[in-house]
Image (cartoon, helix red, strand yellow):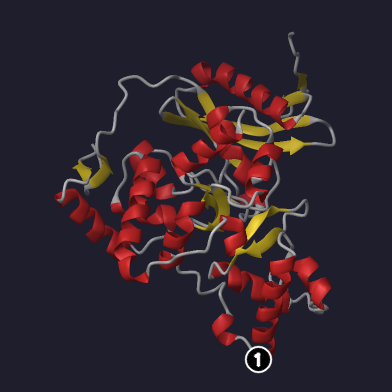
Amino acid sequence: MSPRKMTNAVQAISQLQVDSVNVVRRAHYMPIFARLGAYDITALDKVLATPGSALTEYWAHEASIVSSELVPDLLLWQRRTWIDKSHLFTDEQQELSRRVINYLEANPGSSAREISTALEVEPVTSKEHWGWNWNDTKYVTESLFARAQILTLGRNSQFERRYALTHHVLGEPLEVDEVHRQDALERLINRSLAAQGVATAHCVAEYFRLPIREVKTQLAQQANAGRIEQVQVTGINEPCYMPLETTIPRNVSKDLRLLSPFDSMVFNRRRLERFFDFEYRIEIYVPEAKRRYGYYVFPMLYGDEFVGRVDLKADRARGVLHAKSVHFESGWEAEVHSPLQSELERMAAWLGLDSVQVGCEPPVRRIVVR
């Protein structure tokens, strides 16, 4: 699969959410597989590590791989005040910010840990918080990243951001047009609509975490001006919108795809319920005894319907893709059982696993016919 094909797939949906959970494979790798099939993840890594690439990491729905051209617009409209602590920086932290920028000028692609070592910034010894024991370098780099003064050249094998100055990552200086903020909002709305096909104002806003009031106003203005189409969707008692000249297929191929919990198709749970009558929650942080479906549950998309859930784990030590539990929506088990098995085998092959195990049954080894 060519880098261009991967890039086009990402740009069509505008973002791949990044998450550290690696139960099956890192979250940002999964949506491309679901849409295009098996591919070499190192090819995506190379795209992200290349200066001037069409893709980079920034804040979107959450931390995400996005089209590089969207960074200036996202910078104008993202509200990540809990990350950017620069307004609280001490004189020493302000000075460290300057030192970090100077270091990255000469050493693009460095992690916060590598920068700390080079600049002799002490690690934090306190372990009071399970996930936020950041030293000054980490606070500085995250704040610089939130303001897009630095971006990334992908991530390293420890899943750490490889920071670089923004002009190095984008291949040109970052230009942010504060005067035309509404134009930036319109571009983000149009990309959100294009990615979703048809959406309510809430769906549009939630995709990039945009302010709902401004989104509603902008959508109404665009619809009145004939730049987008306002439509009514059966069962949804509020206006919906879609791009002009959207083609609605009469028939949808009955392929089964497993979507990761962080796929942009499913991360808006309200949209799933309203448009697809499918209730889904991620249960990673739910105590095991209270989980309904499992720890890392992939919704099953069959054609244009969600037909079930499967709790997946890549057991790398045993070489097994383990479907720990499978739950079908009412009436779908007989039709979907065989396509699900095929999709599990396809995913196992991509992950480099030898067999598939469903529930407590013995693993079934994949047979490759040449």
- Closer to the camera in the image, 183 or 77: 183
Q: Tell me the residue that label 1 is attached to.
A: 91
Tag 1's secondary structure?
Answer: helix
**Nearer to us in this view, 134 or 169:** 169
Whether residue 130 is visible: no
Image quadrant for the C terminus? top right
125 left or right of 99 in image: right
Q: Position of residue 45 (x, y in %)?
A: 68, 44
Residue 306: x and y in percent read 45, 32
Of the pair 294 and 26, the residue shown nearer to us: 26
Relative vertical location of residue 308 with respect to residue 22 in this rendering, above or below: above
Q: Is residue 140 above or below residue 328?
A: below
What's the residue at 80%, 36% (across, down)?
316
Task: Write the residue at 65% across / 76% down.
Answer: 140
Question: Which residue is at a point 56% across and 75% down the rendered structure image?
Answer: 84
Q: Residue 283: x percent and y percent?
A: 59, 50
Asked if 349 appears above or below 139 in the picture, the reply is: above
